Image (tube, grey):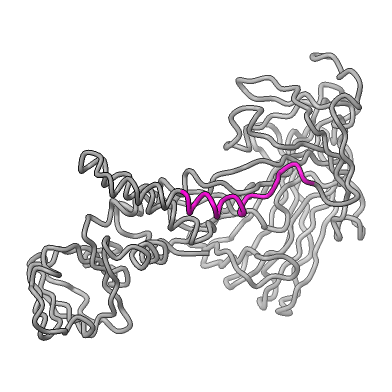
Amino acid sequence: MATLTEVRQACLFQEPMLGRVFPIASAAVQTLTVTALATGTTTARLYSEKWLLRPDAALSGGVAVDRIRISSDYASATGVITQAGAAYTDTTATDENVEIHEFDPYKLETAIQEALGSTTRVDESILQARSDGIYDFSLLTWLKQPSDIALCGVRGAPIITGNRKFGSWGIVSSAGALQPDRWTLAGSGATFVRSMTSRNGPYSLKITRSGTDVTVGQTAQVITSNTDDTSLRGTTVTGVLVGMTAVASNLFVRVTSEDVSGTVLKTTNSSYHTGSGAWEEVSVEHAVDEAADIIRVQAISDADGDSYLDDLYLTTTTLGDGQRLDRYNTEWWRGYKDFTQNPMLLWAPDGGRRMDAQLVVRSLRKYPTFDAARVLAGLADDDETDCPIDLLKYRALARMFRGLSRDTEGNASLVAKANEYEQMADDIASGHIADLTTIQPGAQMMSGAAYGTAMPRGR
C-alpha cells in the first residue's frame, strides 16, 4: 500500500528537476524554515516562486487551507522561505515535511491518476452459479468485451456470495477509503477500514459502530432460471460469519428473504459473538421464503465498539468443513467464448449450468484511481492505493514528462525522459502481471470443444 503523498514524494525523489522534499524546522504565519536549505551564498531565485505543498498541515473545518502556497522569497543564510499568500493557520510543524514543486502539484497528481487508470492487475472474481448457464457480467464493471476475459470456469463450491474473505478491494469510497468488492456498507457515523488484523488472509474488514447499527451485506438470487425446480425457494441456506470483537452482544450474522423490491419477507438471526476478543464463527440456518426473489446475508454490529470481519458468506448446504476450508477445484474453460454483448452475457457450456457452484472469472483489472473530488480539494494525501509504488512512480513520471513536452512543443529531452520512464514501468509491469492462462498443478483445463455442442440459446 502507498498513500498519494508517498507516491508524489517518490516521484520527486526519483526526479529532482520536478521538486524536492524537506523537513520543516519551524513555521510562522508567512514563513517556513528549512534547516537543510540554510546553505548560504545561494541565489534567492533557487527556491522563490515555487509551489509549496504541506501534506501534513492540519485541516480547518475539513478544508486544506494551508496545503498549497507559492514562495515569494528565500534566504539562503537561514533557510527561511517566505510566502505572500494567506497566512498559515497551522504553525506547528513538528515532524512535518514541505514539498517544493517546480510545477503546479496538480500536474503531478493528474499524472498519478492517469497512471493508475492505465495500470492493471490480475483479478479473479466469483459470481453465483446459474442453472440456466447465462451469466451477466454487469457486476464486473471493468469487463467491456469478451477479449477482456482470460479464463472462465466453474468451481464446485456451494457458496453463492463472493469476496467472502475480503481479499479484493477495488472500490474507492467518496471518503477516499478502499472498500471491499461486492459488499454493501451502511451505518450513519460508522467507519469501515481495511485491517491487517486477520485470521487467515491478508486483510479483514474493521467496522466501528458509533450510535447507529453497522451492516455489511451482500445479496444472492433465489431464481436462476425459468424453471421452478431450480429455485432456492423453500430450501435452507446458511449464513456464516467469522469475526472478532471484545464487545459482548454486538456482532452477529443475519439472513433475510426479500422480494424483488427489497421488502423483507423473513428474517433469521444468529446468536451473538461472545465478545471474547478472539476469532469466533457464528452461523444461522434460514428457510428461504416461498415468495422470495433475493436472499441477503449481513454482518451486523449493534453495540458501540470495534469488530473485525474475516469471513462472511452464504452457503446452500449444511455448514461443514468443506465450506470452511474452501478448497474446491475449478474446472476451467480455455478458449470458450460463447458471448453476446449489450449487455455482455456468457452462455456457459453444460458444466456451467448448476446451482451448487460458482462461476470463476479471471481477467485484468485496472487499479482504482484516487477519488477525484478529494484530490481537487487537497484531501487525498493520506488515501491509499494497492498499486506497487515503483510501477506507479515510473508510469506517472512518464505521463508527467509527456505532458511537459507537449507544453514545450515537443521538447526532445522531455520526450526522451518520458520514453525512458515508460520503458521502466513496462519492465516492472511485465513481472507484475502473471500469465492469466496458467493454472495450478492438478487443476482441470477443458477446451470449449470438449463440451460438445452448447445448449441452444433460449432453451
Q: Is residue 26 left or right of residue 314?
A: left
Residue 388 or residue 370, whichever sits in front: 388
Q: Is residue 431 magenta?
A: yes
Judge by depth and name the residue closer to the eye, 4 or 276. 4
Image coordinates for residue 10, horizontal then vertical, percent: 40, 65
Where on the picture, by quarter, is residue 105? bottom left
Q: Quadrant of the C terminus?
A: top right
Q: Is residue 236 visible?
A: no
Q: Where residue 83 sits in the image (x, y, percent)?
A: 11, 69
Q: Is residue 6 visible?
A: yes
Q: Is residue 274 left or right of residue 116?
A: right
Q: How far from the left and from the top, in percent, is residue 58?
A: 29, 72
Examine the image and state in which quarter residue 359 appears. Answer: top right
In the rendered structure, the answer to whether residue 36 lies left or right of residue 387 reads: left
Q: How many marks?
A: 0
Q: Residue at image x 73%, y 54%? A: 164
Residue at 65% over, 37% down: 262
Residue 53 magenta-highlighted: no
- Residue sitting at x 66%, y 76%: 247
Name the residue at 29% across, 49% down. 414
**Toward which corner of the image does residue 104 lie, by quadrant?**
bottom left
Looking at this view, is 284 or 438 the one in front?
438
Residues 226 and 448: in front is 448
User: Is the residue 298 above or below the residue 66 in the image?
Assistant: above
Horizontal side of residue 379 vs 184, given as left or right: left
153 is higher (above) or lower (below) than 45? above
* Image x and y of residue 181, in percent: 62, 49
Q: Give above or below for 184 relative to 55.
A: above
The main secondary structure of the magenta stretch is helix
Instruction: Find the magenta span and give its range.
Output: 423-438
